[in-house]
Image (cartoon, rainbow, N blue to C red):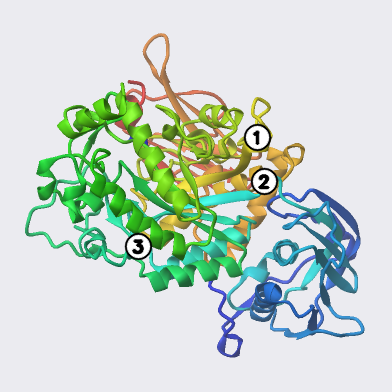
Amino acid sequence: MKKLFLIIPFYFLAIFSNAQTIVAEPEIGDTETDLVQTPVAIIPEPVSILKKTGSFTLPENVSILAPKNEGLKQSIAFLSERITTATGKFVSTVTTANHPTIKLILNSQEDTQLGTEGYKLHVNPTQVVITANKPAGIFYGVQSLIQLFPAEIESKELVNNIKWKAPCVDVTDYPKLGWRGLMFDVARHFFTKQEVKQYIDAMVRYKFNLLHLHLTDDEGWRIEIKGLPKLTEVGAWSVKKVGTFGDFTPPTADEPRTYGGFYTQEDIKELVQYAQERFVNILPEIDVPGHSLAVIASYPELSCTPDAVNYKVRSGEKIMDWSRGAPPLALVDNTLCPANEKVYSFLDTVLTQVAQLFPFEYIHMGGDEAPHNFWEKNDQVKQLMQREGLKTIPQVQAYFEKRVEQIVVSKGKKFMGWDEILEGGVSPTAAVMSWRGMKYGIQAANEKHNVVMSPTEFAYLDYMQADVSTEPRVYASLRLNKAYQFNPVPASVNPQYVIGGQANLWTEQIYNIRQAEYMTWPRAFAISESIWSPAEKKNWTNFVDRTQQHFKRLDLAETKYSPAIYDPIISVRRSADKQLLVELTPEIDGLEIYYSFDNSSPDRFYPKYTSALQVPKDASMMRIITYKGKKPVGRLISIPVSDLQKRTK
């Protein structure tokens, strides 16, 4: 991962015949006026919403009018499944009708305002109409329509006692950026084909259209390459370890290497088709020359280091020393050898097949965090430098990157790498994914490289999103409010070359799909709005209100998410007289914080936080909880005073 310092499972199962039934609480005061006043909670915020009087009610028999177009199948299927499963209403698809319930219209003359992914959504008392230039626009219009109905529309079971109404609105909407990505690291921990599909199902609900699959790393090679069987026979498997990744004891020789997995080429084809049907492109990443221990364990001859014959796929033990910053000091050589012609032949074989499997125009080739200490001592590398007139080790990596780009281009694809590829010089045609802050992306765009903004400070979903006492410990934090500040096209950049924005989910500390969901949502709401919605439409207070409404939708969809916005930010300091002081800052408005130091669990009848707390001399435990009115909303947070003391050091 880009870790300088160390889905959502919407299973769209239309099994209505034997579905269970949820009985919702009867609605109170559900009048036409109430519905008009109910805030529209679409994420990401559309370009334009005009709220009108009245509401639309789903009839018992719902007809969807759509032209015969292969690209509309998924939109129709999604609409039908959501309505049928949750409401129990009968849904039919027609090509002619006097007054259909929902009309899907592809424009015969292009609406230049909408482009390829924009749509117009009109909800009137008797009918819903979605128009777009292309099927992708219809698909996104359908996502917005579903978000207008009561949250129970997300249920996987039949729901009774619900008035299936949507407010009357006119929506015009189109994206700010064409590349709206989420990166899913399936190398550190393997996620099954079905789990990747879940992640795709989740991301399209919020109008993401690019899934970046991080397919290779020190911990695993996840894609079948014909003619190179050891990549998956050896490179896809490690020793199962549970705990804090990076601190595991080195595996012993007799521990079984049975943890992991890979995707066959047929699996990849299936995933690509599944994604394309939902208007998602898949960007494959083959991370080289660093992060390549799984390759080297499979084919040691691709290393510069003779001892590589003894290397194994990493199981989470320490292999890098980050104490001096980047690039790290390698304890084992996890790099492909830039002076070895076999490496380029190997990559040619790999990229020939990757290019055939993934129709997307780009292939991501990594390039990040390659340690140089083994190269610096290697005679082959020294000879390469003399032969090619290279003066520095960064120029050696630049030599490697340019040769790799030539291979990528020879396959009819475009080359992309992490922003380290800028060091030592890079081809003018290389695209850059900027992760080490915005500055490298700004530099690259101003030098006329295509850029995807993916900076750590806004878009790293593996970072802790709440206090360390509630999260698996990671080396940095990213609260929801910070993610919402992401602006992928800052004023100082040449906007012509910023082709998109992206958030990254690295999975060292993420062992299963439920935790992947938890780390993704709701921060991916913030990213989706940052890369889809106009900058002037972004409003933190409004976004928080909509996010809380979507929490109910995720609950009904049985999706795990983080409630961190209800937990206070905990700051610890020493007073002038060395007393331990604790400050509690709510992330959102409307919260009241209660606490205890007496080892009991606080509720709203306990002391209420109003200003910095001095920790009592003999206290051993601090507990905190947040309320909205009379309802507890935050998690009960328990922190030993000894831990609070450590935070001041």
Residue drawn at x 45%, y 64% is: 356
Left or right of 131? Residue 475 is left
| Amino acid beneath label 3 | Ile
The answer to the question of whether label 1 and label 2 lie on touching residues, with beta carbons closer than 8 A, is yes
Please state which of residues 624 and 262 is positioned toward the viewer in this rendering: 262
Name the N-terminal-most of marks 2 and 3: 2
Q: Which residue appears farthest toward the top when viewing the image? A: 576
Name the secondary structure under disc 1: loop
Which of labels 1 and 3 is toward the front?
Answer: 3
Name the N-terminal-most of marks 1 and 2: 2
Please state which of residues 29 and 549 is positioned toward the viewer in this rendering: 549
Q: Which residue is mark 3?
A: 223
Q: Which residue is mark 2?
A: 177
Answer above or below: position of 164 versus 389.
below
Graded by Cα atoms within 10 Å as few (under 14), some (14 to 19) or many (20 or more), the crowding at tag 2 reads some
Name the secondary structure under disc 2: loop
Please state which of residues 133 and 571 is positioned toward the viewer in this rendering: 133
Residue 439, numbered circle: none
The percent coordinates of residue 320 (x first, y second) are 23, 36
Q: Which residue is mark 1?
A: 489
The percent coordinates of residue 21 (x first, y second) are 60, 81
Q: Is residue 460 among the parts visible in the rendering? A: yes
Q: On the image, which quarter does residue 543 sit in?
A: top right
Residue drawn at x 21%, y 50% is: 296
Cα distance between the residues tagged 1 and 3:
34 Å
Answer above or below: position of 12 versus 529.
below
